[in-house]
Amino acid sequence: MITYNHESYIKQAIEGVLMQKTNFRVELVIGEDCSPDRTRQICKEYSSRYSNIRLLPSEKNLGVIPNLIRTLESCTGDYIAFCEGDDYWIDPHKLQKQVDFLNKNNDHGLCYSKAKVYKEKEKTFKKSFGVEALTFDDLLVNNTISTPTVLLRRELYDRYNGDIQPENKDWIMGDYPLWLWVAHNSKIKFFDAEFAVYRVLENSASHSTDYKKDLAFLTNYHKIKVFYINKYGHSNMENRVWQRYYSNKAYLFLFKNEKKIDELLSEIKEFETPTLKLRVLTFLLEKKFLRLFLKLYWKKNS
């Protein structure tokens, strides 16, 4: 569990772990990244009361990736589960179900489920996130794995760490590169159930009110995909990955900075693959006209 400025949520995250009913020992390792609020104090209170909670405080803010890496490397169990400080588990048998499955299926390295999505600003639950994506190609097109639902074999993380050395990359997300590596080197199991709640904050690493931050996240997300295409030679997926990138980029601009659409269209026109260029341009033009239509409709009916 990594956490920063989660004083309003961290208790719920910790309690979700403590409520787990298992026939094996569970250790909760909390990487607290020098929060200016009461997050560390709350974590200290829990670690002093429960011997299976180990707190890793930091005297300076490390950032998401360094904090994630040091926390993962401090885990000692055969399996690693993930739950950031603003998410929480809702099924008391989550860990038992997942460990039972992996114990019986040695060819599987990771399992996950759907997660309920909670929009913090609106105080409402939205449609669940997470669908079955069991292959490397599935995940390369789109990450459909919800992090707080994952259970992973520890030995696979160690192999990933040695092979990829994520601490030397300029990636701003730590989970997606790991999922891709595991999908290429092992089998994945999807549980068609809701094991956790994924909380969407107005401003976080993957969601922001500033389109520039969202664009930086999207660009880095695409960079990870290209890295794995080159590493594993999946050139057959290149067109689909680029189409997804430009489609997501267009969607971002349409809703957060429409002035950038023309610039994006010019960028795509320089793309070297004619078929892909045509497919992406068609998609964007349809979306642009749809956006303009909706604006006119809202104006007329407001």
Image: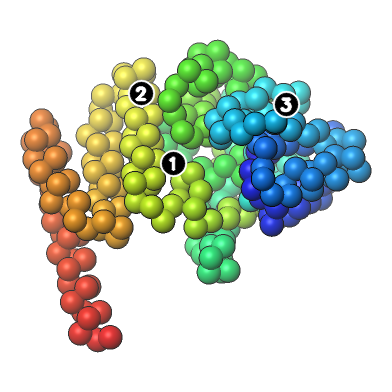
Q: Secondary structure at mark 2?
A: helix
Amino acid at pointer 2: Phe
- Graded by Cα atoms within 10 Å as few (under 14), some (14 to 19) or many (20 or more), the crowding at tag 1 reads some
User: Which colour assignment does the render follow?
Assistant: rainbow
Q: Quadrant of the N terminus?
A: top right
Q: Earlier in the sequence, mark 1 or mark 3?
A: 3
Disc 3 from disc 2: Cα separation: 27 Å
Count of number-bearing discs: 3
Question: In this orientation, which residue lies closer to the viewer: 27 or 166?
Answer: 166
- Graded by Cα atoms within 10 Å as few (under 14), some (14 to 19) or many (20 or more), the crowding at tag 3 reads some
Amino acid at pointer 1: Asn
Q: Quadrant of the C terminus?
A: bottom left
Q: Secondary structure at mark 3?
A: loop
Q: Is residue 256 above or below residue 153?
A: below
Q: Quadrant of residue 68?
A: top right
Q: Which residue is mark 3?
A: 75
Judge whether residue 139 can be spotted in this image: yes
- Graded by Cα atoms within 10 Å as few (under 14), some (14 to 19) or many (20 or more), the crowding at tag 2 reads few
Q: Nearer the viewer, mark 2 or mark 1?
A: 2
Q: Is residue 11 above or below residue 104?
A: below
Disc 1 from disc 3: Cα separation: 25 Å
Q: Is residue 142 left or right of residue 38?
A: left
In x, y percent, where is residue 274? Answer: 8, 36
Q: Which residue is mark 2?
A: 227
Q: Quadrant of residue 62?
A: top right
Picture residue at 28% right of the left edge, 43% below the top: 244
Disc 2 from disc 1: Cα separation: 15 Å
Q: Is residue 256 left or right of residue 54?
A: left
Q: Which numbered dot is residue 143? A: 1
